[in-house]
Image (cartoon, helix red, strand yellow):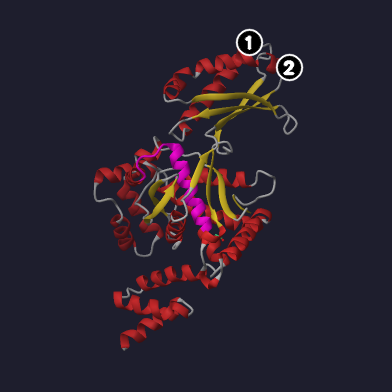
Amino acid sequence: MKQDNKTISGFSSMRKRDKIKWLVENFFKDPESVMHELKSYWHKNDEQQKILDGFSENTISNFPMPFGVAPNFVIDGKTYCVPMVIEESSVVAAASAAAKFWMKRGGFKTEIIGTEKLGQVHFLWHGDPSILFTHFDDAKKVMLADVEGIVANMRKRGGGIQKFELIDLTQKKENYYQLRVSFETCDSMGANFINSCLEQFSHSLKSFYFNHSQEKQGLEIIMSILSNYNPNCLVRAKVSCKIEELGDFPNGMGAELFAKEFKDAVEIAEIDPYRATTHNKGIFNGIDAVVIATGNDFRAIEACGHTFANKSGSYSSLSHCRIEGGNFEFWLDIPLAVGTVGGLTNLHPIAKRSLEMLENPSAKELMSIIAATGLAQNFAALRSLITTGIQKGHMKMHLLNILNHLKATESQIKSATDHFQDKVISFNSVRDFLKTTTLN
Ligand code: MEV
């Protein structure tokens, strides 16, 4: 029987070439060509490739994604060309179109509502609760003194530790308490800073109660980690104009009806979690694309945003719309814990360029840019949905993808684009069309 080589030990310490060799020989039908293909995506500059390899473990190649830009974003009076990394066709086009639309109507206005980030030490207290609380003020002094070495530098930059709370959660779980700490991390996302402080707190907390109370083994640390839910690291992005300034829309829809149906669409997302999920997904199409392009953590941003969308206890829209006194207002409140220094932001060569393209913004400015892009994306999606439907735009990009896949020439692309204006687009229909145009 053929030996199964699909498991391996010592993989992480093998050389990259050997890793690829093992992989292609055991998991692919055509090892030579797969090996060649994977290597073709290596950066031609060894130093650059080393940097990329350093971001993760067991890297074998790079995974290309489109890096696009959405120009004409006027945000708080400043014009940006916004970098976006996304594979979904039509997202960048939609963001650009919405940016241009609002550029002529005063642009996006933003407000930073807060920049607080949170971390937690989760622990069990097996002793008399009054002992835990009686000594807590002294314990807090020791904990804060013990992190001074970590905090001093952050304080110089204007940040540090803000709130420090001991929370009794024994109603939810026996003996369970929590240290909840809030941080200001300035222009960095702050994950390392926060986690280092929290781990030190847990050591200090444990040893304080061991040395200062009769309950020597009373305190059991479970874990210390930042919370990705940062509801007070919040930005609002808003657009508004007189209803008549909205202009006319496809399918002959006038401004009044557009404003009304747009508001209806937002309200539906506010009350129905099924629609809210898709609505918010559209917002994250814009948000994630900028978050990735600037080297930030899109999983953290997504997790936080969805928890925030559920803050009332029912998952709801992140954006809202109001029509008042003849004015149309549309806004998005979104927590965004992002950084413009540290982490990948300065290491990833393209993330660095993205930030340069944005004229090296502060973290607050980046929050504004990201929120405005999310709002633009949401506006574009709702505009399509209540007028033409989204398939028209999507299909245009889909057609281009099929034509490129079939290696169509420039003139074939042009005639196919004209031909499929009012026809159903499928892989087969496009292939058949190309065959007939080639024969003609
Ligand atoms: C598609 O990626 C996003 C939309 O579904 C968002 C929405 O429905 O609002 C178009």
- Identity, as a three-letter code, of the amino acid under mark 1: His
Q: Judge left or right: residue 250 versus residue 213.
A: left
Q: In which quadrant of the rendered image does the N terminus lie?
A: bottom left
In the picture, measured across the screen, residue 416 lies left or right of residue 246, that is left
Say which element carries label 2: helix
Q: What residue appears at the point 39 percent right and 50 percent down from the top-left corner?
A: 82
Q: Quarter for ligand 1?
A: bottom right
Q: Which mark is residue 130?
A: 2
Q: Is residue 249 above or below residue 282?
A: below
Q: Is mark 2 within 8 Å of ligand 1?
A: no
Front residue of 36/97: it is 97
Q: Is residue 261 above or below residue 218?
A: below
**Magenta stretch secondary structure, dominant:** helix
- Write the start and end of the magenta stretch as one range: 358-379
* Residue 101 spot, x, y in % from top left: 46, 58
The mark found on residue 212 in the picture is 1
Q: Residue furthest bottom?
A: 440
Position of 69 compared to 121: left or right? left
Residue type, numbered disc 2: Ser
**Residue 351, image x, y percentages:** 36, 45
